[in-house]
């Protein structure tokens, strides 16, 4: 049976061809050696896994005392207070040292000046909790929309004391609630602020580059979607594990796989189907002997991590459908759920968002909730564009806590960008995308949209030497596709 199954597996397809050094590591020359068709060796060669220097920098995202009695107004006030100096500095660079910096209470009609504040976007289509309550009582249902933007949306700028409606040269559809920006213009007779230009905080200073001088890779994958019942997704996941651990391919491919120094799983390890709440609405005697779908999915996750951790260090981030707290920052999965893999020191259960230094390269990223939320509440359709926008705005998740749940921080906002990363990623994107962004002060940032593996069968490799990135894909085809298959493709 397994012979027939494996005979229908299309392994590691990519823009560079089938599973080969050129496909998996386009810039790496494999070690010479025997191929899969060569004679067997009495002593098969072994390849040492490339080591790495690692430091977890996610402490700001770890919650100590947990108190939900505070109001979110403290978070908005802290965000504005921390970001105001950077925005005022950016305003002087853009509009000159002599630009007038005013607070809303100091505005005078007709006086051109710059104001720093937090955006509020009034949206007619934004979901309302009152409408959700109406749904429960069989009243008019709330329409399900992919995007909630509308031409009637309006922008309001708030500071510590007042708020004012914005008009003029500012595109409301591209902006979201919670973003902090500087606007240049003047107040009109009708009490509105006419915007002539606006700017964001832009990229913060970047840490000195200390990346390796030789090829060294970090594999990024997200959205394994375990528990969905899809055999194709599970087979693709196993092929990915085999490729990373050196169980797939000839000696040349195995020598290349040894260059993967770390694996990073960016959330949604479990499928959305494991979140079913039907049992809550059934009588207890009907669900007495049933088991939550997430239990088996977590067991599968533990077995997959066991295979990976025995070969390579693995960082595991939680996601929207994983068994941890729902609000950002999500705390690490509990080790008791993973009894097999937790025995290995190579397993690191980390937060979402996640920040770490890997061989002198600063990684920062999320499991994708912040990007997908901005996608719904703005006109931006491209995940990579949204990723770049959050970087230039100086804030990972501006829509939290308005439309994205987050912890009510009091004296800090950990989502503010204080250091510019070298690699900035988001998980569970609809497709793979990457871009090397260059900042005004010479910062170089690799932006990566990591696709959901269960939907695309695609992961990606980041080369720490030159910040290049490429996808690796796995796919399965049926018997009807056998006639179209060509050897070596």
Image: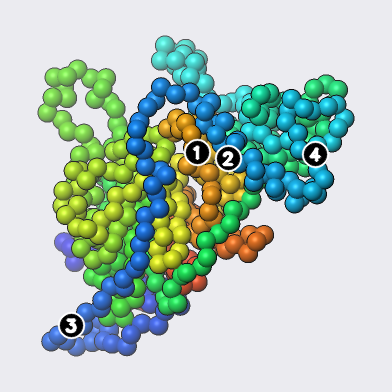
Precedes in sequence: disc 2 or disc 3: 3
- Residue 105 sits in quarter: top right
Q: Are the residues at dot 4 and dot 1 in contact (C-beta closer than 8 Å)?
A: no
Which residue appears at 79% of the width and 28% of the height? 107
Circle 4 packing at 10 Å, graded few (<14), some (14-19), many (20+), is some
Q: Is residue 162 left or right of residue 309?
A: right
The percent coordinates of residue 19 (x first, y second) are 35, 72
Identify the residue under disc 2: 82
- At 50% across and 38% down in the image, what residue appears? 413
Q: Are discs 2 and 3 less than 8 Å apart at CB?
A: no
Decide which of 394, 487 is in the foreground and name it: 394
Between 185 and 450, the one nearer to me in the picture:
185
Residue at 25 percent across and 56 percent down: it is 347
Q: Quadrant of the C terminus?
A: bottom left
Helix, strand or loop status at disc 4: loop
Circle 3 Cα neighbour tier, 10 Å, few/some/many (<14 / 14–19 / ≥20): few
Nearest the eye: 21 or 108: 108
Distance, label 3 to label 1, CA atoms, is: 53 Å
Inter-mark Cα distance, 4 to 1: 28 Å
Separation of residues labelled 4 and 2 (CA atoms): 20 Å
Does dot 1 land on a helix, a strand or a loop?
loop
- Residue under pointer 4: 100
On the picture, is 384 further left or further right than 356? right
Q: Earlier in the sequence, mark 1 or mark 2?
A: 2
Foreground label between 1 and 2: 2
Q: Pointers 1 and 2 in contact (CB under 8 A)?
A: yes
- For marks 4 and 1, the one nearer the N-term is 4
Q: Which residue is mark 1?
A: 413
Residue where numbered disc 3 is placed: 44
């Amino acid at each position: 049976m397994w012979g027939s199954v494996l005979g229908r597996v299309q392994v590691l397809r990519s823009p560079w061809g089938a599973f080969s050094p050129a496909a998996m590591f386009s810039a790496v020359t494999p070690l010479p050696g025997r191929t899969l068709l060569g004679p067997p060796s009495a002593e098969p060669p072994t390849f040492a896994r490339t080591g790495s220097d690692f430091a977890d920098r996610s402490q700001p995202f770890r919650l100590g005392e947990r108190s939900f009695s505070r109001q979110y107004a403290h978070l908005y006030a802290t965000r504005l207070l921390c970001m105001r100096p950077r925005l005022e500095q950016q305003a002087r660079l853009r509009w000159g040292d002599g630009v007038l910096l005013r607070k809303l209470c100091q505005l005078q009609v007709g006086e051109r000046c710059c104001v720093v504040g937090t955006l509020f976007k009034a949206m007619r289509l934004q979901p309302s909790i009152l409408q959700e309550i109406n749904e429960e009582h069989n009243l008019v249902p709330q329409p399900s929309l992919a995007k909630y933007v509308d031409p009637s949306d309006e922008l309001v700028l708030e500071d510590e004391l007042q708020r004012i409606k914005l008009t003029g040269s500012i595109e409301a559809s591209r902006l979201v609630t919670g973003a902090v920006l500087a606007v240049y213009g003047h107040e009109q007779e009708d009490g509105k602020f006419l915007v002539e230009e606006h700017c964001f905080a832009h990229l913060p200073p970047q840490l000195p580059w200390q990346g390796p001088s030789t090829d060294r890779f970090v594999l990024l994958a997200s959205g394994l979607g375990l528990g969905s019942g899809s055999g194709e997704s599970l087979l693709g996941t196993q092929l990915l594990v085999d490729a990373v651990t050196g169980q797939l391919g000839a000696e040349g491919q195995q020598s290349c796989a040894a260059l993967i120094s770390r694996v990073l799983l960016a959330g949604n390890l479990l499928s959305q189907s494991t979140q079913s709440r039907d049992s809550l609405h059934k009588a207890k005697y009907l669900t007495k002997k049933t088991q939550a779908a997430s239990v088996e999915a977590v067991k599968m996750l533990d077995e997959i991590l066991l295979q990976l951790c025995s070969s390579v260090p693995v960082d595991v981030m939680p996601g929207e459908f994983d068994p941890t707290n729902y609000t950002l920052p999500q705390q690490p999965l509990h080790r008791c759920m993973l009894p097999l893999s937790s025995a290995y020191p190579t397993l690191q259960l980390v937060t979402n968002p996640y920040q770490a230094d890997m061989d002198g390269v600063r990684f920062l990223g999320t499991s994708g909730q912040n990007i997908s939320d901005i996608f719904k509440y703005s006109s931006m359709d491209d995940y990579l564009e949204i990723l770049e926008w959050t970087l230039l705005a100086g804030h990972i998740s501006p829509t939290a806590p308005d439309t994205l749940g987050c912890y009510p921080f009091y004296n800090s906002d950990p989502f503010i960008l204080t250091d510019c990363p070298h690699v900035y990623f988001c998980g569970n994107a609809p497709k793979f995308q990457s871009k090397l962004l260059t900042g005004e002060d010479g910062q170089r940032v690799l932006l990566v949209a990591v696709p959901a593996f269960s939907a695309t069968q695609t992961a990606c490799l980041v080369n720490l030497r030159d910040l290049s990135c490429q996808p690796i894909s796995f796919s399965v085809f049926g018997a009807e596709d056998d006639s179209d298959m060509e050897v070596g493709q």
